Amino acid sequence: MENQKSSSSLKAVIAVLAVLLVGSLVYIFKITSDADTVQTELKTTMTEKESVMKDLQELKATYDAAISENTSMSDELIQERDKVVNLMADLNKSKGDVASLAKYKTQFIALQSNMKVLMMENEGLKKANTTLTTQRDSTVVVLGESKKYNEVLVGQNEELAKAVEKGSKLTVLNMKTSAYKLRSSGKQIETDKASRADVLKISFTIAENQIAKSGDKTYYVQVIDSKNNVLGDKKTENFGDSSLVYSFLTNVKYENKTVQVTEDLPGRDFAQGTYFVNVFDKNELVSKTSFTLR
């Protein structure tokens, strides 16, 4: 009888221990599963944080490249770049929880949108600057050609014109430019002093040509002072891929006979030094000369 009681007690103890063992195993499994879940979420969060940081670094690199081009928008670009740098610093200090990452992603998207707008404006300014540079270079090239030409051929226009064979193209010669002082009476007195000059008188001759086409003819006159400034109207005329900045234009009625053309270019505060005067038939240089004001 006592043996039966001992056996029953032993079985009860074993049953309790089995229940406790099963409970422990279930608890350990749950703890392990929760830990794995937390670790997975942590890895995912860190990956997203690194992704946002990478996007911000690329955004900063884009701004750095645009700023290095030194356009008129550099100040705006620097301000936006600094916002990106500050956001990177904040993100680096953050714990990387889901809520803060969502905030950083939202701020990144806003900065990215601003960047796209600024980049479009910056590209537009670069294209406009390229156009202005091309026009300036065109004027500088013409000035350089004028200087070289005048070193060799000043004073030989009449002799050269007599040697040119007759053709359908009109010849411009006898080009002369003088400075004048205007009296209150309206009388013009020639001067070679820049401080006294009120007007430049530019004259040239269109030679007789019996086989040329008669009718109205337009010439573009370009006057460049000793500081490389184009005087007068400073208007621009385009001829296909090239452009010309001119001081004034003159219209001539040509009837196959010699025509004398004289035009006045008023001004003030004329600079001292050598001036270059060029006459163009459309975009073709047909005559040039120089003079000096002291």
Image: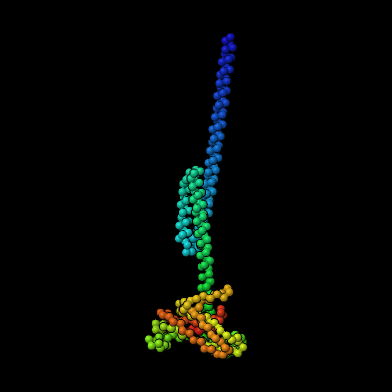
Number of numbered labels in the structure image: 0
Which image quarter: residue 283? Answer: bottom right
At x 54% / y 35%, what residue is drawn?
34
Q: Is residue 12 above or below residue 143?
A: above
Which residue appears farthest toward the top when viewing the image?
Answer: 1
Q: Is residue 211 above or below residue 46?
A: below
Residue under the image location 59 percent in, 14 percent down = 7
Name the image quarter holding the N terminus.
top right
Q: Quadrant of the C terminus?
A: bottom left
Q: Position of residue 151 (x, y in %)?
A: 51, 83
Residue 233 appears in the rendering:
yes
Q: Height in image: 62 above or below 219?
A: above
Would you say 286 lies left or right of 75 here?
Answer: right
Tell me which colouring the rendered structure shows: rainbow
Residue furthest out toward the left: 184
Q: Position of residue 252 (x, y in %)?
A: 53, 85
In-front residue for pair 138/11? 138
Q: Residue at x 46, y 46 (%)?
A: 93
- The residue lying toward the viewer, choosing from 103 and 46, is 103
Q: Position of residue 28 (x, y in %)?
A: 55, 30
For image coordinates 47% across by 51% down, the residue present is 87
Residue 60 % position (x, y): 50, 55
Residue 160 is at least partly visible in this image = no
